[in-house]
Amino acid sequence: MEKDTHFGVTTGDGTRCKGKGICRRIELKLEELTIVADFLAVELGKVDVVLGMQWLDMMDTMGTMKVHWPSLTLVFWVGKKKVVLKGDPSLIRAECSLKTIEITWELEDQGFLLEWQNYEIEAEGGQEARSARRRGGATTEIQFLLTQYADIFEVPRGLPPNRV
């Protein structure tokens, strides 16, 4: 591990983690796929590995890659084998304003992935129509449950607990 590197990682909730080093050309063996990539050594709680996008450049992929963001699925071909990678949905949900991104951005940062999940359209029907769209068309019963159990739907704060 190269320890003389200086980098940090910002988690989805805005927590900054200082990197411990870079491990070069590590082989990650999955069932039907071996990925060789440089990995950043960062203490991230229960997460074993986070794959960035750089490793895709090194793969001998055939054709078009398909990404389905809502299900966190990446599908591509390596040779004659179809590869399907599924992400862990518990690791990605964090709301963040563009202002927060601007404030936390540092010189060594390389990028952020932004996914728009809410948008507003003004249409006939006034405020009620806009509110229903923003909630995804939630019915009164669903909205009641969302309000009653709001603590369950809050964005997590901090890193997940360590494994035992």
Image: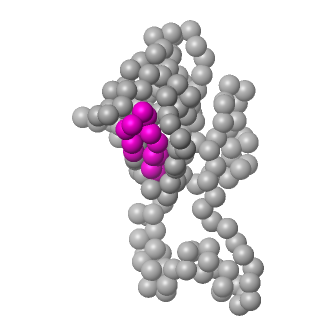
Measuring from the top left, give residue 142's x and y in whole percent.
45, 80
Q: Quadrant of the N terminus?
A: top left
- Visible in this render: residue 53? yes
* Residue 105 screen position, x and y as percent: 70, 36
Q: Residue furthest left?
A: 164
Give the magenta range.
Answer: 72-84
How many marks overall? 0
Left or right of 25, for residue 131: right
Residue at the spot 49% in from the left edge and 28% down from the top edge: 59
Residue toward you, 96 or 36: 36
Judge whether 45 appears above or below 95 on screen.
above
Residue located 29% across and 34% down the image: 31
The colour mode here is one colour
**Quick check: 99 left or right of 160?**
right
| Up/down of 147 relative to 91, above or below | below
Picture coordinates of residue 27 (x, y %)?
38, 20
At 52% from the left and 25% from the top, the residue drawn is 58
| Farthest residue, direction front | 80
- The residue positioned 64% from the left and 49% from the top of the image is 114
Q: Is residue 91 visible?
A: no
Whether the magenta-drawn stretch holds residue 73 is answered as yes
In the rendered image, residue 130, in percent from the top left (x then y), is placed at 67, 80
Dominant secondary structure (helix, strand or loop) of the stretch shown in magenta: strand
Q: Is residue 63 above or below residue 117?
A: above
Residue 79: in magenta span: yes
Nearest to the observer: residue 66 or residue 144: 66
Quarter of the image with the C terminus in it:
top left
